[in-house]
Image: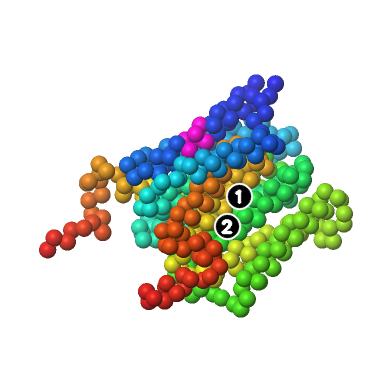
């Protein structure tokens, strides 16, 4: 009875959260109501987070010896991550906002990647589609994380110059294909039970490493002036990753919020690029931002 | 008796499709001045990933899962809390009826002489 009540409460809280996210985003898209929009979305977030502690009433027997430690860790992580980021966000200068958005976005991508990592290491996927979605979310989340960190470093002035090497696009392409190939290999050996050469866990580490490297390589050649568009792309990426991991966990709130942000972020990216009279492909692949920067300097 | 809240198969694809469409339509016609605040606001919304992290951490049954789950919650909480703080500050500038809540802001335009 108690577990049923817990499930109902979690379900209701997630439904309310999903509604408030949509409604809040709608209000945020008009200057007159924008300030109230974020408040509504915030209420939804608090409700969903509080309700998620009810998961403790519905756990597997094998988890019980770890439960106390898990709850302690959860509270600790919420306190450190939440309070730390809150204070940083309150203190930062208005001009430094874009890089703060980048770093928070990277954190979200990292969280999605971490969820995927637990699923992959625990071998939790039940079928091919779940495994593929987990890997896809992991790939997008990891790219978004390392890419956002580079975007932050560029706006913060830690990396000053766009870093380019010869035939950068080809190297990036090869690294990306390598990530896809490792993911394909993981799917193949998991499903067929063939000898994986290395253990599947090692392949998972390799997969994450390549995905993170690709995010770095993809962002390094892009000039600082183009960073807002790039951050917007990674914002959409993180949303997509969150939506996919929501599917893996069977959590509708994550699915809806993630996919809404994925689509909204994509449209925002296109609008921002259009406002600069550029196409997104132009931003990502032609290194034009450097020229803009050179003109100003 | 138990309720199954998970969404699988084609129902999941429908949810994804409708949610994606909703996100696209909601953002349509947004004025350029709101591009950055909206990016920040949607950045906050995908902070919901913290709930997924909490689910993962609470159900952790090995040390490895605890460690990775801890970081999932840590990063997700940072995304949500930081995203809110930053967005709230950006959007505070759009408030129409708030002339004197922050009187000495450095970039207030007081160049009358």
The furthest residue to the bottom: A166
Q: Can you tell which mark lies on residue A144?
A: 2
**Which region shows up in magenta?**
A16-22
Q: Is residue A72 visible?
A: no
The furthest residue to the left: B113
Image quadrant where residue A125 sits: top right
Residue A76 x %, y %: 55, 46
Element type at mark 2: helix
- Asked if the residues shown at circle 2 and circle 1 are in contact, with their CB atoms under 8 angstroms apart, the answer is yes
Quadrant in which the C terminus of chain A appears: bottom left
Is A135 included in the stretch rendered in magenta?
Answer: no
Residue underneath mark 1: A241
Left or right of B100 in this view: A191: right
Residue at 72 percent of width and 49 percent of height: A132
Q: Are marks 2 and 1 on the same chain?
A: yes
- Tell me which label, 2 or 1, sits earlier in the chain: 2
Q: Is residue A94 visible?
A: yes
Residue at 62 percent of width and 71 percent of height: A169
Subunit under mark 2: A
Residue A160 x %, y %: 47, 73
Q: Nearer the viewer, residue A191 or A89?
A: A191
Residue A293 x %, y %: 42, 73
Quadrant in which the N terminus of chain A appears: top right
Subunit under mark 1: A
Residue A21 x %, y %: 48, 39
């Amino acid at each position: 009875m108690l577990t049923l009540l817990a499930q109902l409460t979690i379900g209701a809280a997630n439904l309310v959260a999903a509604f408030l996210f949509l409604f809040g985003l709608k209000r945020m898209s008009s200057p007159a109501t924008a300030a109230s929009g974020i408040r509504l979305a915030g209420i939804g977030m608090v409700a969903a987070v509080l309700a998620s502690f009810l998961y403790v009433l519905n756990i597997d027997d094998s988890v019980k010896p770890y439960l106390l430690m898990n709850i302690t860790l959860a509270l600790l992580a919420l306190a450190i991550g939440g309070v730390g980021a809150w204070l940083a966000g309150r203190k930062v200068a208005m001009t430094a906002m874009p890089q703060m958005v980048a770093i928070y976005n990277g954190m979200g991508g990292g969280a999605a990647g971490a969820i995927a990592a637990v699923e992959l290491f625990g071998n939790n996927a039940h079928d091919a589609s779940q495994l593929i979605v987990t890997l896809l979310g992991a790939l997008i989340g990891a790219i978004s994380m390392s890419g956002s960190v580079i975007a932050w470093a560029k706006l913060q002035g830690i990396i000053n110059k766009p870093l380019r090497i010869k035939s950068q696009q080809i190297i990036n392409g090869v690294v990306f294909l390598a990530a896809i190939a490792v993911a394909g290999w993981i799917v193949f050996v998991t499903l067929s039970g063939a000898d994986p050469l290395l253990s599947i866990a090692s392949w998972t580490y390799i997969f994450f490493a390549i995905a993170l490297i690709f995010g770095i390589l993809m962002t390094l050649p892009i000039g600082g002036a183009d960073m807002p568009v790039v951050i917007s792309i990674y914002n959409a990426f993180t949303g997509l990753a969150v939506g996919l991991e929501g599917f893996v966990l069977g959590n509708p709130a994550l699915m809806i919020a993630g996919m809404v942000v994925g689509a909204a972020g994509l449209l925002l990216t296109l609008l921002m690029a259009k406002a600069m009279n550029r196409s997104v492909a132009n931003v990502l692949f032609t290194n034009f931002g450097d020229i803009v920067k050179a003109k100003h300097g | 008796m138990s309720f199954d809240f998970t969404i699988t198969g084609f129902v999941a694809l429908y949810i994804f499709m409708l949610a994606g469409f909703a996100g696209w339509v909601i953002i349509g016609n947004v004025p350029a001045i709101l591009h950055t605040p909206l990016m920040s606001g949607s950045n906050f919304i995908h902070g919901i990933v913290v709930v997924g992290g909490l689910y993962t951490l609470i159900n952790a049954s090995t040390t490895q899962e605890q460690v990775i789950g801890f970081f999932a919650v840590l990063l997700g909480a940072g995304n949500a809390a930081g995203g809110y703080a930053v967005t709230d500050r950006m959007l505070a500038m759009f408030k129409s009826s708030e002339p004197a809540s922050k009187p000495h802001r450095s970039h207030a335009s007081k160049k009358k002489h």
